[in-house]
């Protein structure tokens, strides 16, 4: 009898999924209107989400969900997002058990951008086929009905099963998502999502994700109380662009300001930690600093010296992370580019990021910044900005930039002659 009940329950589940799939096919093909959904075997929350998805132009045959933010902007978003500090909590309660359970754990911003996607490596790889990756836009308006996107749209916990998804590429998956709010203001910060097979959309899974969200909100509340009663650093700032020696400037609660010059290695570490508020293990930090020669023992010694320079209360361990947000001239340029304010980006750009650094991670970030700024300057068509770019060390060998200056309609005869001479020199040097 027990087997009979189980079998009957399984048959009903399959029948329900089949019914939902049939209704979905009729609806997206335009063969039934929205009123039909009221009588169809479909949950109201799903029917209403399908209608919103159709109204906003989501394609049910979407090959993959579109990307949201550029990589450098994703780094910025992660660095400043309130949920970054709660990543250790999420990893302990969800990710560690998901690593071999065939499920994916995702943390989203309030606008639906995926910030972190972790879990079972095989499941994460399969999820990449639908662009379920950091930086992708999984809001309902972009991806259609899905647990994190629709949970954010409604600001309520939600489970979406298989064929209830609006886009077909997502229908092999089921997911459970719970929004997370600021414990003081109540502001929606984002959502925690568990994505996997059919067993993900169960009451037990919902209870687990809900408990994780509560733990995260409690963590944020405790962090707020702890920071508000701690003297420490009120404002800290890094200067890491250009040929000047890198500097750390900190102002405490009493208004006292202290500036110290950093070694190249300490500057590398602080830049990397400022871009990764969730923290870095000693091994990961060693790899980012030097992919061959460093080991965890060397990193621990370097971190001990760094604490003596900037203060032990600014850096935590296991993983290594900054205990308060740190601004920088690097972030200023990235932020100006994100706003589309190229003039402000140029005015804040003192030169390449830590030009003497040999860290592969810093070199990658240096290239991203320089390349992004150059492209932005050239796209403006501004003669003044172009000239400022070409005066920089990176601009001196920029042949395309000098050619643009030479051909610019507003350039005077003297500047055109100078550009022609510079182009001839570049051609001679690199021929």
Image (cartoon, rainbow, N blue to C red):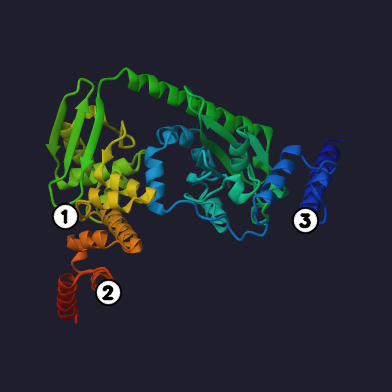
State the image coordinates of residue 60 (x, y, percent, origin top left): 68, 56
Q: Earlier in the sequence, mark 1 or mark 2?
A: 1
Q: Residue furthest top?
A: 229
Numbered label attached to residue 407 = 2
Q: Helix or strand or loop: what does disc 1 sit on?
A: loop
Position of 263 relative to 222 (above/below): below
Of the residues tagged 3 and 2, which is closer to the observer?
A: 2
Give the alpha-carbon distance from disc 3 to disc 2, as whole Å.
56 Å
Q: Helix or strand or loop: what does disc 3 sit on?
A: helix
Q: Are marks 3 and 2 in contact (CB under 8 Å)?
A: no
State the image coordinates of residue 91 (x, y, percent, origin top left): 47, 37
Residue 264 left/right relative to 129: left
Q: Residue at coordinates 18% horizontally, 73% vertically from top-left?
A: 413
Numbered label attached to residue 140 = none
State the image coordinates of residue 243 (x, y, percent, origin top left): 14, 52
Residue at which label 1 appears: 356
Which of the image's four quarters has the N terminus? top right
Residue at which label 3 appears: 25
**Front residue of 126 and 38:** 38
Residue 297 seen anywhere in this rendered image of the structure: no
Q: Residues within 10 Å of mark 3 (few under 14, many from 20)?
A: some
Residue 188 left/right relative to 430: right
Residue 103 seen anywhere in this rendered image of the structure: yes
**Front residue of 398 and 177:** 398
């Amino acid at each position: 009898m027990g087997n009979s009940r189980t079998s009957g329950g399984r048959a009903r589940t399959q029948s329900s999924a089949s019914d939902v799939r049939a209704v979905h096919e009729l609806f997206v093909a335009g063969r039934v209107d929205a009123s039909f959904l009221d009588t169809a075997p479909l949950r109201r929350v799903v029917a209403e989400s399908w209608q919103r998805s159709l109204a906003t132009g989501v394609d049910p045959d979407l090959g993959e969900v579109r990307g949201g933010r550029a990589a450098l902007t994703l780094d910025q978003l992660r660095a400043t997002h309130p949920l970054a500090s709660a990543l250790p909590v999420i990893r302990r309660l969800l990710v560690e058990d998901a690593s071999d359970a065939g499920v994916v754990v995702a943390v989203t911003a309030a606008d639906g951008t995926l910030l972190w996607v972790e879990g079972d490596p095989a499941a994460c790889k399969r999820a990449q086929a639908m662009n379920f990756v950091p930086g992708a836009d999984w809001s309902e308006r972009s991806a259609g009905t899905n647990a994190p996107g629709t949970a954010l749209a409604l600001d309520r916990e939600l489970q979406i099963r298989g064929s209830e998804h609006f886009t077909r590429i997502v229908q092999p998956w089921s997911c459970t998502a719970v929004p997370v709010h600021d414990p003081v203001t109540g502001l929606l910060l984002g959502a925690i999502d568990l994505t996997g097979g059919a067993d993900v959309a169960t009451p037990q899974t919902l209870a687990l994700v809900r408990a994780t969200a509560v733990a995260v909100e409690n963590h944020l509340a405790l962090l707020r109380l702890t920071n508000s009663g701690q003297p420490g650093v009120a404002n800290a700032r890094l200067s890491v662009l250009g040929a000047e020696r890198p500097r750390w400037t900190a102002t405490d609660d009493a208004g006292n300001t202290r500036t110290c010059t950093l070694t190249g290695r300490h500057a590398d570490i602080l830049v990397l930690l400022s871009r990764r508020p969730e923290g870095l293990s000693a091994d990961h930090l060693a790899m980012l600093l030097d992919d061959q020669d460093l080991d965890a023992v060397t990193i621990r010694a370097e971190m001990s010296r760094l604490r003596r320079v900037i203060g032990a209360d600014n850096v935590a361990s296991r993983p290594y992370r900054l205990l308060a947000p740190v601004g920088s001239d690097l972030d200023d340029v990235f932020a100006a580019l994100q706003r589309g304010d190229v003039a402000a980006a140029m005015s804040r750009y003192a030169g390449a990021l830590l030009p003497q650094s040999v860290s592969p991670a810093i070199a990658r970030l240096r290239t991203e910044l320089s390349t992004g700024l150059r492209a932005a300057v050239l796209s403006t068509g501004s003669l003044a900005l172009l000239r400022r770019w070409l005066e920089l060390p990176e601009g001196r060998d920029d042949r395309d930039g000098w050619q643009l200056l030479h051909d610019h309609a507003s350039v005077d005869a003297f500047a055109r002659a100078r550009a022609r001479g510079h182009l001839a020199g570049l051609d001679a040097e690199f021929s």
